[in-house]
Amino acid sequence: MATVTLHNLVKAYGKAEVLHGINLEVADGEFVVFVGPSGCGKSTTLRIIAGLEDVTSGEVQIGGRTVNHLEPKDRDIAMVFQNYAIYPHMSVRKNIGFGLRTSSLSKPEREQRIEEVAAILSMTEYLDRKPAQLSGGQRQRVAIGRAMVRDPAVFLFDEPLSNLDAQLRSQMRLEIKKLHQRVGTTIIFVTHDQVEAMTMADRIVIMKDGHIQQIGTPAEVFHQPANIFVAQFIGAPSMNLMPGRAVAGGLEVGGTMIARETGRTGAMTVGIRPDDLCVTQDKGCFSGRITLLEPLGSETLVYVDIDGQEVVAHADGRNPPALGAVVQLTVDPANLHLFGADGEAIT
Ligand SMILES: Nc1ncnc2c1ncn2[C@@H]1O[C@H](COP(=O)(O)OP(=O)(O)OP(=O)(O)O)[C@@H](O)[C@H]1O
Ligand SMILES: [Mg+2]
């Protein structure tokens, strides 16, 4: 087990700088997820930690030791990629054992280690099969097994679930989480799927254009997003954003005055999560016409046009309103998210 520290990492390809000073401290045994849109620098950061890419400047420490000049094999890490290259001609046993090819263990010790890892991954009965005789999820477990067998200090995962279908993805998500609870190894996991990030991470690192936007627990980044980008990236459907104006004692938004003291005056952006905006029978804050209904079972997403602005609210799935109806929407003023002209949260 080990801590991972990134100190002011900068990476340029030729003249193009793609990481602009990444700082992060991952605690021993922590499960950290990097999330962000395509091209934001997640894989590059992971590959730098793994030693597969050089840094332009900055420092990488693993277990308190600077590893910038160490080869990947000397960093005590194991990496699992999206295209989990397992060898089709080798049995599961050989594929997992491949992770031990450079180890100094004796043959019986290796066999024992492979059996242990297979047991943790519930793959014991498949040890003598070839990959072609396995499901996608089982193949992914073989790839994870090969990474685990060396008992590395840090696991690095780069979108390992993105080739799996939706059901298998959520199953593997749970399995990786359970695996982490059992073995306790430090994990850095890259994904562009915010649901994966929210469900698995101890802490989430949200990146955009080579910059970290926010680091926090899933609850922190959801309830206290640092800026508009994070607010819209985390949570599905995305947070509603409405232009607002703060006055003494209140906030004017969507044609209504809401009793929320902001401590300042002037224009700001008001964010409301669809979960916090409810269709109500009583007098609400806003009123508008329903343009679309999206039934999800327990709840129904309700798209409402408030004075030319479309927002997403929710209603009870058992008793949804009708398309085209004019409805009242209510929100607890305490649940409004406020952002300044620079996009940063006003707290
Ligand atoms: N070998 C390379 N040469 C030049 N530019 C590169 C190279 N590898 C990556 N980049 C650029 O660096 C930026 C970050 O790429 P990176 O692969 O880290 O993104 P990512 O966040 O992993 O995206 P994705 O979600 O699509 O995998 C991108 O703009 C990419 O085009
Ligand atoms: Mg990537």
Image: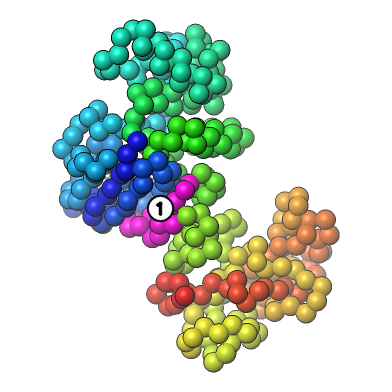
Task: Name the residue: 27% across, 40% down.
Answer: 63
Above or below residue 298? Residue 291 is: below
Task: Name the residue: 43% across, 36% down.
Answer: 184
- Any magenta on residue 207? yes
Task: Name the residue: 57% across, 90% down.
Answer: 249
Q: How many marks?
A: 1
The quarter of the picture where the N terminus appears is: top left
Q: Nearer the viewer, residue 266 or 302?
A: 266
Few, some or many residues within 10 Å of mark 1 (<14, 14–19, 20+): many
Among the 4 quarters of the image, the one containing residue 95: top left
Give the residues drawn in magenta, as a range. 201-216
Task: Locate residue 239, reporting x and y percent.
Answer: 57, 64
Among the 4 quarters of the image, the one containing residue 74: top left
Above or below residue 35? Residue 254 is: below
Q: Could you tell me what secondary structure mostly forms the magenta stretch? A: strand
In this picture the colour scheme is rainbow
Task: Mark 1 and ligand 1: say if the CB distance to the nearest ligand atom is below 8 Å.
Answer: no
Q: Nearer the viewer, residue 112 or 286?
A: 112
Task: Locate residue 27, reporting x and y percent.
Answer: 36, 47
Q: Nearer the viewer, residue 75 or 287?
A: 75
Q: In the drawing, does residue 279 fall left or right of residue 36? A: right
**Does the rendering let one see residue 28?**
yes
Above or below residue 204? Residue 187 is: above
Task: Name the residue: 43% across, 43% down.
Answer: 31
- Taking the view exactly as shown, the residue that stands out farthest to the bottom is 248
Element at badge 1? strand
Task: Locate residue 32, reporting x and y percent.
Answer: 42, 46
The three-letter code of the residue at mark 1 reads Val
- Any magenta on residue 210? yes
Among the 4 quarters of the image, the one containing residue 330: bottom right
Task: Locate residue 39, reporting x and y percent.
Answer: 36, 49
Q: Which residue is mark 1?
A: 205
